[in-house]
Amino acid sequence: MVKKGPIFSFFALLIVLGVIIGFAVNPIIHRVNLGLDLKGGFEVLYQVEPLKAGQKIDSDTMSNAVAAINKRINVLGVSEPNISIENGHRIRVQLPGVKDEKRARQLLSTTAKLEFRDYKDRLMMDGSDLKPGKAKVAFDQMNKPMVTLQLKDPKKFASVTKKIASYDPLKRENVLVIWMDYKKGNSYAKESGKTNQKFISDPSVDQELNTSDVEITGSFTAKEATNLKDLLNSGSLPVRMVEKYSTSVGAQFGQDSMKETIYAGALAVAAIMLFMLLFYRLGGLIADLTLVFYSIIVMAVFVGLQAVLTLPGIAAMILGVGMAVDANIITLERIKDELRSGKSIISAFKAGNQRALPTVIDANLTTIIAAAVLFALGTSAVKGFAVMLLISNVVTFVTSVYGARLLLGLLVHSRALNNHPWLFGVKRSDIRGTK
Amino acid sequence: MELNEKMDYKHYNKFYDHFDFMKHRNVFFVISSALIILGILSLFVFKLNLGIDFSSGTRVDVQSTEPISIEKVDQTFRAMNYDPERPVVSGTHKNIATVRINEELNQHQIAAIKSKIKAQFGIEPNVSMVSPQVGRDLAKNGLFALVLASIGIIIYVWIRFEFLQGLTAVLALIHDAFFIVTVFSLFHLEVDILIIPAVLTIVGYSINDTIVTFDRVRENIKLSRKRLSTIEEFGAIVNLSIRETLTRSLNTVLTVLIPVVLLLIFGSESIRNFTLALFVGLLCGVYSSICIACPLWAVMKVRYLDRRKKKRTVQTQA
């Protein structure tokens, strides 16, 4: 007698899961964070070096540097930046989807140490005398862009300007030279004659100025003024950063890679499903259904962990499909073995599942070990691959082992499959005792 | 089913029903040894074509909307005073050219190249730069990962099975990993950072097949209900276990080969060598699990038992 209850539960379960998936797919897909190899963008590994001799690079300096970089990235408005410290003295910055790469890279690596020096390059004031975050872009009467600053202590500015005003105006010695990233060997005397000067500007000072407002005018464009303002507001870097590794991907390149890889993946999934269906019949159909759930759950977990999808990550997911099916294959082969040995469908299903489980666990755990090592040691693209591999392996347990067992179990227990071993791809002539 | 029944029972109607894996073990051992020697020779003669990830320099991927001409790419770089290696053209429409410059370019040079290439070819190129120190670190890190993963797997298989099985499983997977390296060396394929995840995936994957077979060996030994000692006895168990799990092994490798082959044909150019490494590794992995790991284990096990027996006799005599 065929029992209707389990069959009803089977279809009810399918419909419920189908509806949940139908509603979940779109929100999940739209929340996937794409890595820079899919979206375009760049990644730089900086070596952090001391600014002055004797400066120590310890964890404090590093976190200060990261904080400064963070502020600068905020200025750029990148949605998913990733900054991490590596090996104690390296900083990796990933900016997916950044539009103006040139500007971003300049903004990131400039030390942005603002200094006020006199005509003999003696240091008068520096960035630490500024009120943080108060730099603004303004325009003078001629509509030329300038940057306005606020000083912490007007008295210090008064004493500095008093001193400068006392120098000889005829030899143009009464200048306050504003430098950005002054290096040893730079000198005002050498630079002032050139057309492309290394300092920002050199206003002359005629009298003591007792004020906290300073304007920097120079021969810069509005864009350069904005850059200067952003740099000053995000504060100077406490260290020097040298690019040791960089990779940048064009947006078009990234999109094309993603399209091609997803296309290949879709074909692969279709081919695997067809294969399973042909080889394992009903068992294959169930495996295919669980594969759909597998794909959705993997994506959902991935989004939930806020992991970043990279090209190798997509590859891992596609590979994961093959591996998820492996769990089904191990189980279904076992069930076939049991059927061939002459067992009834119900007991073959039970014994097959029982015997296959330890094998599936062993097989998956070894892959998990390899993936975990990759996750711990890998960087960026490799890490994206490892995360996906880990997730797919864990999700496989849920869908291909328990999900498939539940769905197939309902059908088996309805007794509708009794005496139909062909539904599992077993020929009657192969069954022991029926030769 | 009892073991004896299973041994007599040949109803699978598969082409491998009568294939004696143990009898041909020496053939497999010779083939694999020859491949390993070939690999070592190749590493000395051809070396590895290390990408910039593991050495240093700058790599530019130029993409165009139409088929790309090597000469044009070459000239564009020479016009900027660079000395590129001969560009390699790839892509289904021959519209991608990869150029390698043996200098570490700074951010200004990279910005200049990007805008120049975009003006000439219409699409923003990919540019990567690696300094020697970082390249060395990446290579070191990769090897370290491989060793660590192998140790983890040995320990796991040791706990779940026995030490000798763990050892042969790892020997088989080192064999697979090395075969990937051999192929890359022989055909002068570029080795980039993605070789590490590829090799480690194969490591995790090839071990699957091995474990599934060992699992069956363990089960069949239990079924035999006697103390096995000779190579013939172990051989019979190994043969049976391989045959019983072979459909599964072949089907699984097929379901993973399907996506790999499709990725190889239709997937992105950037992961071509990655998928190629997977392809080679998968094929080698299924071969080594079946033809190397199990027979090798049987041989080692019998030797170990013999030695222990001799030791015991010596002890009792004394």
Image (tube, rainbow, N blue to C red):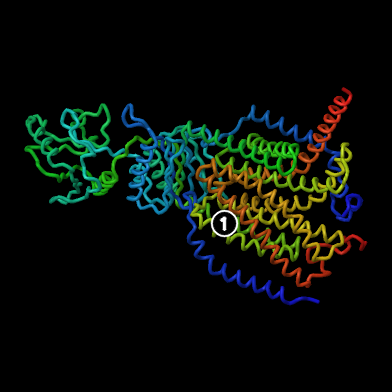
Nearest the eye: A190 or B85: A190
Q: Residue at x 71, y 63 (%)?
A: A405
Relative horizontal placement of residue A316, taking residue A134 as reference (left or right): right
Q: Quadrant of residue B35?
A: top right
Q: Position of residue A249 (x, y in %)?
A: 46, 47
Which residue is label 1 attached to? A262
Q: Position of residue A179 (x, y in %)?
A: 22, 36
In this rendering, the count of numbered labels is 1
- Figure check: A95 above or below B138: below
Relative horizontal placement of residue A40, taking residue B302 as reference (left or right): left
**Res B75 visible:** no
Q: Quadrant of residue B305?
A: top right
Relative horizontal placement of residue B68, taking residue A295 as reference (left or right): left
Q: Position of residue A331 (x, y in %)?
A: 74, 57
Nearest the eye: A199 or A80: A80
Nearest the eye: A237 or B86: A237
Specify few, some or many for label 1: CA neighbours under 10 Å numbering under 14, 14-19, or 20 or more. Answer: many
Subunit that carries the residue with mark 1: A
Nearest the eye: A210 or A257: A210
Q: Residue at x 16, y 31 (%)?
A: A118
- Figure check: B15 above or below A378: below
Which residue is outermost to the top? B318
Q: Is label 1 in a helix, a strand or a loop?
A: helix
- Figure check: A325 above or below A382: below
- Report the amino acid beneath label 1: Ile
Quadrant in which the N terminus of chain B is drawn:
bottom right
Q: Position of residue B283 (x, y in %)?
A: 71, 45
Q: Residue at x 27, y 46 (%)?
A: A233
